[in-house]
Image: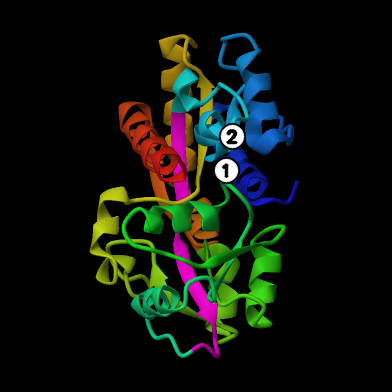
Amino acid sequence: AGGATDVVARAVAPFAEEALGKKIVMQNKSGGAGAISTNFVNQQASDGYTLLLGAENPQLHGVLGLGELDYSKFYPVNILGRGIVVIVANKDKPWKSFKDVLADAQANPGKVKMGSTGPGGLPHSVGSMIGTLTKLPVTAVPFDGEGPGLTALQGGHVDFMPVGLGAASEHIKAGRVKALAVLSDKPFEGIPALTGDLPGIAKYLPWGPFYGVFVKRDVPDAVKTKLTASFKTAATNPQFVKLMTDRGNAMMNISGNEADAFLKKWQSVTAWTLQ
């Protein structure tokens, strides 16, 4: 409760209820980085009355050894949006770009400290992705989430950290940390695109944590159609769009084959870089 996935679920639910003409009862089933909730929904009847609103984690359960289920077993009713990822640094570091971070780290192996949230977390995934293209000999320092990591960054305990824009935006605006790059092929709100410093990363994009609504793959087609139409309408509601963008997310609002293609590419890119 209160986490990013929970906030997105409770924000979109009222608009989906309106479009469906049905009440949606929210149940938080945390644990196992999404494994508990994913397994629960998979065990329910294939009637479309039990939906899963989940984030990206199940796409990595196989490679992380957390379970065998991933979103290939489910039908994507709607991939609502994905988080925008930025690389931020301690404001007192002399770096002006991510290229400067790379140069410093490669000249002084192990001396530059990167904030992390542990194996499979966003900083680890982004660091692994960069590491497939160039040497990134930094020391990863794990914290219990992006919030504690950003606090440590401001205190100079770590030097830089890849994080979700939603967690870092207020710190960037206040000048408490400095943004060096956005994980994109286009600049965002004055933050340079990482492809400028690392062109090869373009083949992995778009990338970021995402939020989606799923039902079991064998739910009747008529039910899928009704759910898809309802959540498509809900995801265009201006209040929901504002909440998502204010929290540093890029709207997607895709379903069916288009969503499946995005999910497969995301899984392929991330699992391969972690492996």
Q: Main secondary structure of the magenta part?
A: strand
- Name the residue type under label 1: Val
Can residue 83 be seen at all in this image of the molecule?
no
Where does the magenta region start and end? 77-93
For the residue labelled by badge 2, is the local secondary structure a helix, a strand or a loop?
Answer: strand
Task: Kindly state the secondary structure of the residue where label 1 is placed.
Answer: helix
Would you place residue 35 above or below residue 199 in this image? above
Residue that label 2 marks: 53
Mark carried by residue 12: 1
* Pointer 2 with pointer 1, Cβ within 8 A: yes
- Mark nearer the N terminus (2 vs 1): 1
Give coordinates of residue 56: x percent, y percent: 52, 40
Q: How many angstroms separate mark 2 from mark 1 (CA)?
A: 10 Å
**Quarter of the figure with the C terminus:** top left
Vertical comparison of 230 with 248: above or below: above
Q: Nearer the viewer, mark 2 or mark 1?
A: 2
Give 222 or 92, whichever is nearer the viewer.
Answer: 92
